[in-house]
Amino acid sequence: MLSAIVVNKASREPSDQFSGLARSLPFSRPATWGWRDVQQQVFAQHPPGMT
């Protein structure tokens, strides 16, 4: 989920809607799922500064 890198400036976390979307179909993430893991995967595949 590429949207894992979009975070609230004040909290530095995604909105509550992001977690709700991630746990719904077609994504179906478990309750123990953490957005930071996905964010790390996104940065590993698409490092900042790469074009």
Image (cartoon, rainbow, N blue to C red):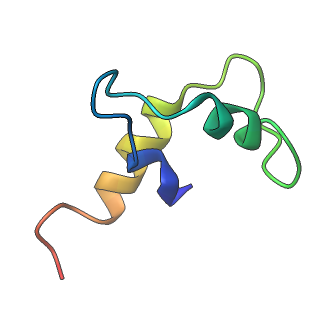
Q: Nearer the viewer, residue 32 or 13?
A: 13
Q: Would you say 45 lies left or right of 38 here? A: left
**Residue 35 screen position, x and y as percent:** 52, 32
**Residue 36 screen position, x and y as percent:** 43, 31
Q: Outermost residue toward the right?
A: 25
Q: Would you say 19 lies left or right of 39 here? A: right
Looking at the rendered image, the quarter that the C terminus falls into is bottom left
> What is the quadrant of residue 1 in the picture?
bottom right
Q: Would you say 7 lies left or right of 2 here? A: left
Residue drawn at the location 37% of the way across and 34% of the way down: 8
Q: Outermost residue toward the bottom?
A: 51
> What is the quadrant of residue 28 in the picture?
top right
Residue drawn at the location 74% of the way across and 43% of the way down: 21
**Is residue 4 shown above or below 10?**
below
Label total for image: 0
Q: Nearer the viewer, residue 22 or 32?
A: 22
**Is residue 17 shown above or below 30?**
below
Residue drawn at the location 62% of the way across and 28% of the way down: 16
**Is residue 22 shown above or below 3?**
above
**Residue 20 screen position, x and y as percent:** 75, 34
Q: Outermost residue toward the top?
A: 32
